[in-house]
Image (spheres, rainbow, N blue to C red):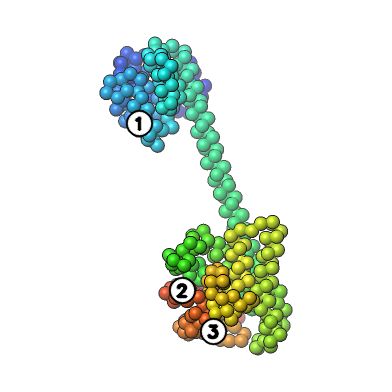
Amino acid sequence: MSNALDFTDKPTILVVDDTPDNLMLLSDLLKDSYKVKLANGGAKALRLAATQPPPDLILLDVMMPEMDGYEVIRRLKSDPDTADIPVIFLTAKTEVEDERLGLSLGAADYITKPISPPIVLVRVETQLTVRNARRFLQDQNAYLDQQVKERTKEVELMRDATIHAMASLAETRDNETGNHIRRTQNYVSALAYALQDHPRFAEELTDENIDLLYKSAPLHDIGKVGVPDRILLKPGKLDPDEWETMKLHTVFGRDAILSVEQYLGRSNGFLVYAREIAYSHQEKWDGSGYPEGLVGDAIPLSARLMAVADVYDALISKRVYKPAFTHDEALDIMRAGRGTHFDPDVLDAFLAIEEKFRGIAARFQDVELV
């Protein structure tokens, strides 16, 4: 009888029976179409089942000394490496209860002795066909899962690239560089990880949320696109009216992200953090910031992290209205803002990892064009 499954390699059948004549009978019956392994007891059957590659099917006698077939199948099904191997019971027991027990333990089929060769061959081929179909579906599911992951990654890369493009437009209008975006998002990430075990922040600063903070941080000044050039690019000090207009960049940024949420009809963690950062990163711990004059924990944590990152980077960077301060000078200025401008715990974490900030600044330093 030909093997309709058309495997490149013959499937392997493990035959388990304590009677030599039964082993020989089944071996002769199966050997033309399958690779056959023989075991004259439960212990040997378990050893052979655990070999690599495992058998594709097991024909298992029920009534055996020392370890009967029921105990063998219990052990097979309890081991992840052998649990998926289909088992057909071969037994002289014909009671319904015996069959019920075997099937309840995970047997795929139940053949009574004395065996009928045609029935054995058909049942074996049927179980191998089912196993082959199951493997195919598992492979297809794994392939589809991988495809979904790749497409999701592609979409995320496109999203991140779009975010950087939008943020870079805002920074370009402010005579800043794309490296400011890279520095500040890396500062925020480093600061968040430094606070991850802090009792005040541990619940919010999960790895997933820190990743969202990192990705949303570049949009902190997106609202600057709404500020007129005469104010945004003014080299001198702004007058009171100009300053009020400049402060509106936080509102413009929030409204831009709100419009995205309204268009989608929903929000998500990324958009929430982006909106919080854009709107509240100019707030100060003592309530003297803008646009709402929020105090203390009323300021979103995302914005408190961004405040430290943004101020540090502004201090160490050259602007049309100021020279760049050194790293140590920036630290002194920021220490003075502990508890007034900055959340004390966030500022303390910054000071504890200030060398990481110095390293990020060096890695993404601005290059002046000549």
Image-based side of 44 in relation to 59, left or right = left
Tell me if mark 2 has few (under 14), some (14-19) or many (20+) residues whose alpha carbon lies within 10 angstroms of its own: some
> What amino acid is found at the position of numbered circle 3 in the picture?
Ala
The tag on residue 324 is 3
Whichever of callouts 2 and 3 sits on the residue coming sooner in the sequence is 3
The tag on residue 75 is 1
> What amino acid is found at the position of numbered circle 1 in the picture?
Arg
Cβ atoms under marks 1 and 3 closer than 8 Å: no
Q: CA distance from mark 1 to mark 2?
A: 55 Å
**Residue 6 appears in the rendering:** no
Q: CA distance from mark 2 to mark 3?
A: 26 Å
Q: Quadrant of residue 95?
A: top left
Mark 1 or 2, closer to the camera: 2
The tag on residue 345 is 2
Whichever of callouts 1 and 3 sits on the residue coming sooner in the sequence is 1
Mark 2 or 3, closer to the camera: 2
Whichever of callouts 1 and 2 sits on the residue coming sooner in the sequence is 1
Give the vertical position of 160 relative to 230 (above or below): above
**Label 3: which secondary element:** loop
Where's the C terminus, which quadrant?
bottom right
Residue depicted at x 36% and y 19%: 61
Q: CA distance from mark 1 to mark 3?
A: 71 Å
> Measured from the top left, where is residue 139 in percent x and y?
52, 37
Image-based side of 293 in relation to 259, left or right = left
Tell me if mark 3 has few (under 14), some (14-19) or many (20+) residues whose alpha carbon lies within 10 angstroms of its own: some
Give the vertical position of 249 relative to 60 (above or below): below
